[in-house]
């Protein structure tokens, strides 16, 4: 999860993520293996993966294997749950969020 220290380093306002979490809709199918999704973790994961892929792609050998499990989890949620933030699909929302903050790098 994105903590306060990491958020400061990246120039991310955690309040924006917490506020957006209140606007998330996830369609989780009724299935015994599905557990409730922590929306802050969902948003943070999407944002961090996009930041890493867009701004630190040259260092993928450093972070790639560590992030693969999180990326698989996120892809499964996106595929099955079709999460949306304010009516926009999660990954589009996260890409826009990162684009808007990219001047902070």
Image: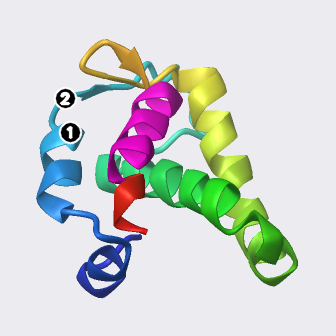
Q: What is the x, y in percent for residue 55?
A: 62, 62
Q: Residue at x 43, y 19 (%)?
A: 27
Q: Residue at x 37, y 73 (%)?
A: 10
Q: Label 2 near label 1: C-beta < 8 Å?
A: yes
Q: Residue at x 31, y 78 (%)?
A: 3
Q: Residue at x 43, y 48 (%)?
A: 98
Q: Is residue 18 magenta?
A: no
Is disc 1 surrounded by few (<14), some (14 to 19) or many (20+) residues within 10 Å?
A: some
- Which span is picked out in magenta? 90-101
The residue that disc 1 covers is: 20
Q: Quadrant of the N terminus?
A: bottom left
Residue 47 as seen in the image, left or right of residue 10 = right
Q: Quadrant of the C terminus?
A: bottom left
Q: What is the x, y in percent for residue 8?
A: 26, 79
The answer to whether residue 12 shows anywhere in this view is: yes
- Figure disc tally: 2
The label shown at residue 23 is: 2
């Amino acid at each position: 999860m994105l903590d306060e220290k990491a958020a400061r380093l990246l120039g991310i306002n955690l309040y924006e993520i917490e506020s957006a979490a209140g606007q998330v809709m996830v369609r989780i199918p009724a299935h015994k293996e599905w557990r409730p999704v922590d929306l802050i973790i969902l948003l943070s994961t999407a944002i961090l993966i996009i930041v890493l892929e867009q701004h630190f792609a040259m260092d993928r050998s450093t972070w790639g294997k560590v992030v693969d499990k999180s990326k698989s989890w996120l892809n499964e949620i996106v595929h099955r749950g079709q999460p949306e933030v304010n009516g926009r699909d999660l990954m589009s929302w996260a890409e826009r969020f990162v684009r808007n903050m990219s001047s902070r790098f």
